[in-house]
Structure formats: C-alpha cells, structure tokens
Image (spheres, rainbow, N blue to C red):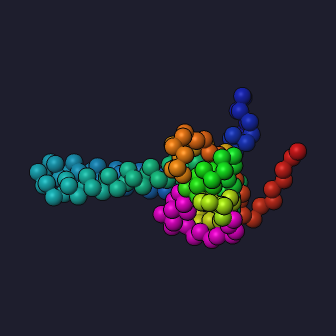
Amino acid sequence: MERPGRSAKADARPPDAGRQAGHLRADQVGSERQCRIDRTGRWEDDAEVVAEAEQALADLVKVAAAKELEALLDGEADGNDTFLEINAGAGGTEACDWAQMLARMFTRWAEKKGYEVELQSEEAGTEAGIKSVSYKISGPNAYGWLKSESGVHRLVRISPFGKGTRETSFASVWVYPVGTTISRST
C-alpha cells in the first residue's frame, strides 16, 4: 500500500530486511536479559555478576551499532565486490603523491575490514607517487561501503618536494560494482 506523499520505492522493504530485523530482535532480547542479570546482581550485591552484565551490555551496544550501519547498505548493488580506480589530476608530482596516499588509505581500510585487495593495474608517476591505479576489492558490502567515495578528492599542503609553497592537488576516485552493467549517459 502506498502512503500519501511517499513513493512506492520508499515503502519497499530490502530483500534481506527480515534477516536484519531478526538480528535486531535477537539483540533486543539479549539486551533485556542482560538488564535482568544486572538488576539481579545489584539486588544480591554481587559485583562479579554486575561487572559481567555491564561488559555483556557494552558488547551488545557495539553489535547493535554495527547492525544499524549495515542496515543502511540496502542498495541493489551494495552487497557486491567493487572495482576502485584512482587517477592523479591537476598538480603534477604533487597530484601523483596524493593519488598514492589515497590508494594506500583505501587498501589499508579494506585490509583492516578483512577484504581481499587485488591490484588490477598501476602506472607510476614520473618523480613520485602514481598516475593511476585500479584494484578489485572483494568482501561483504564492499561496494556499499565505498560507493560514496566516488568523485574528486582535493589536498592542500605545503609541498614536500623542495618548493616550500602551498600546493593544491587533485585525484579522482571512481568506484564500480562488480557483476553489474554500468551505462553512462552523455
């Protein structure tokens, strides 16, 4: 049923909404149980039980926060692996250095999340950094997490390459889902 002022798409449930709701219900039941244990421990004046309940409750809060973030990744391709492409823009050597910093930042982030990072291609800069690089990043919701990074990234800093001047560097980052057809309109 469509509500007035809302589109049908806004009312549609994501395909895994039931699974996500089940996780949230389980977290809620666990939270209620831990609160009862905490009250019992306080009533019986048992510091060990209270400490255990407080730790379990803190763990549940972390799990709930993670599940809340994952619930936002409900787009059609969000669960897919992704291709990440970084290109140095205007700024010469500075831009190539900035592109390399971005590449290192994204690969470290992906490895920290437990994703597999596979280098697809790389072109080195003339003096430092990289002109372009592309990676395939594989893991749960890789595209969903990275899709908002698409666009031009800018860095303003004092040049470390002996100029001593303030330089502005640009690098473009493009993120594509693996396994989907992408059409670009002109």
The residue furthest left is 45
Q: Taking 30 as reference, is 179 left or right? A: right
- Asked whether 122 falls inside the magenta stretch, the response is yes
Image-quadrant location for residue 130: bottom right
Image location (x, y in percent) of residue 51 = 20, 55
Q: Quadrant of residue 97?
A: bottom right
106 within the magenta span = yes
Q: Residue at x 62, y 45 (%)?
A: 169
Q: Position of residue 88 (x, y in %)?
A: 67, 53
Taking the image as shown, residue 185 lies to the left or right of residue 167, namely right
User: Is residue 175 among the parts visible in the rendering?
Assistant: no
Query: In the image, is residue 106 above or below residue 69?
Result: below
Residues in magenta, as a range = 104-123
Instruction: Indicate left or right for 149 with 50 as reference.
Output: right
Q: Residue furthest right?
A: 186
The percent position of residue 179, horizontal first and vertical second, equals: 75, 65
| Residue 19 relative to residue 150: left or right | left
Image coordinates of residue 107 in percent, x first then y, are: 55, 62
- Which residue is depicted at the point 69% across and 49% down? 89
